[in-house]
Image: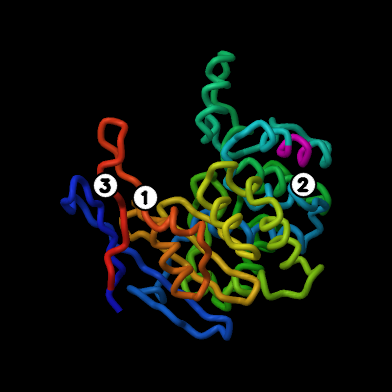
């Protein structure tokens, strides 16, 4: 199937287009919508964080609830996120000096402005992956593994995570790269990502898979931010699990095992959420609140003058 087309419409004219690859499976695990090549290798980026968190839980990571959601997060750096990262680190007897993610400012606008007003600067703890990195460090401590090179693909932690990714996707990791935070990035197919998310939400209650999925669904603001689209999607549809990744990747699954993966080919993030809503609807997942996310407004002079929308098939 051809890729899905997303139109950027300004003042009634199609100004630009994005193309999307989409892989959606139904409750029975069979594909219900495939647009573009979803079987070749892809870079899911932070959409893999639930699987990384699962690998850590299986290895003994001793956290639950909102802190476990934070371990799978690309957080916005809001104050409660930063407090949570500090709690994970303190529980392992560590502090933020052990983090090896890059220095950054918070993604959340108000949190970023607060840091700058207080004459602060970029710090590792503000980086959106610091929840994952703090959990990686905590997993190392509980296992007696070295903490200085936990990002190394050959480290016991990363080998355990890789085995988890391969198990849930049903694929061998064909290539290993470096994510934006410096942690290993495992390349699999979009179809494999959808299968993996399906397994997270269909696993029996109390299993490590469900502990990760349930923590994220119960605390969606901890996996992203209070105003982020992933949290809005999960609040709109009870039982829905959504995780975004850089370069416009989304993965989702619901309590019935309907699941999918979305990739905007050119990495244009403004097209990601409208395509994800289209993918959810193709899976039979809908809610009134999704109508406001099916398109993204386009502004001129501070007022809406158009929208980003999926072109009708």
Within the magenta stretch, is there residue 88? yes
Q: Nearer the viewer, mark 2 or mark 3?
A: 3
Q: Earlier in the sequence, mark 1 or mark 3?
A: 1
Q: Residue at x 59, y 57 (%)?
A: 234
| Residue 201 pos. (x, y %) | 66, 70
Q: Main secondary structure of the magenta part?
A: helix
Q: Which residues are magenta?
A: 84-89
Residue that label 1 marks? 296
Q: Residues within 10 Å of mark 2 (few under 14, many from 20)?
A: many
Q: Which mark is residue 306?
A: 3
Residue 210, image quadrant = bottom right
Q: Residue at x 50, y 70 (%)?
A: 260
Q: CA distance from mark 2 to mark 1?
A: 39 Å
| Residue 206 pos. (x, y %) | 81, 68
Q: CA distance from mark 1 to mark 3?
A: 9 Å
Q: Nearer the viewer, residue 182 or 300?
A: 300
């Amino acid at each position: 199937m051809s890729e899905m087309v997303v139109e950027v419409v300004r003042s009634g004219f199609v100004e630009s287009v994005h193309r999307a690859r989409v892989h959606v499976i139904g409750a029975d695990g069979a594909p219900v919508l495939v647009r573009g090549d979803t079987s070749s290798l892809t870079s899911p980026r932070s959409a893999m964080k639930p699987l990384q968190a699962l690998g850590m839980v299986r290895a003994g990571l001793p956290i639950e609830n909102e802190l476990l959601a934070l371990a799978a997060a690309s957080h916005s750096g809001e104050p409660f996120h930063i407090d949570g990262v500090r709690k994970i680190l303190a529980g392992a007897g560590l502090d933020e000096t052990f983090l090896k993610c890059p220095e950054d400012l918070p993604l959340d606008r108000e949190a970023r402005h607060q840091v700058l007003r207080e004459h602060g600067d970029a710090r590792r703890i503000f980086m959106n992956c610091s929840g994952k990195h703090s959990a990686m460090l905590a997993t190392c401590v509980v296992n007696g593994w070295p903490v200085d090179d936990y990002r190394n693909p050959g480290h016991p932690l990363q080998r355990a995570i890789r085995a988890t990714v391969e198990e849930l996707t049903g694929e061998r990791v064909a290539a290993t790269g470096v994510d934006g935070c410096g942690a290993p990035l495992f390349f699999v197919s979009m179809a494999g990502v959808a299968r993996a998310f399906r397994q997270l939400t269909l696993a029996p209650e109390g299993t490590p898979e469900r502990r990760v999925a349930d923590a994220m669904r119960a605390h969606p603001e901890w996996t992203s931010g209070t105003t982020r689209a992933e949290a809005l999607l999960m609040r709109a549809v009870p039982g829905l699990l959504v995780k975004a990744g850089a370069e416009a990747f989304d993965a989702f699954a619901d309590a019935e095992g309907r699941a999918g993966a979305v990739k905007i080919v050119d990495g244009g993030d403004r097209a990601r959420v409208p395509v994800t809503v289209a993918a959810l609807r193709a899976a039979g997942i809908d809610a009134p609140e999704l109508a406001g996310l099916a398109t993204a407004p386009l502004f001129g002079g501070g007022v809406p003058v158009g929208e980003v929308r999926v072109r009708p098939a």
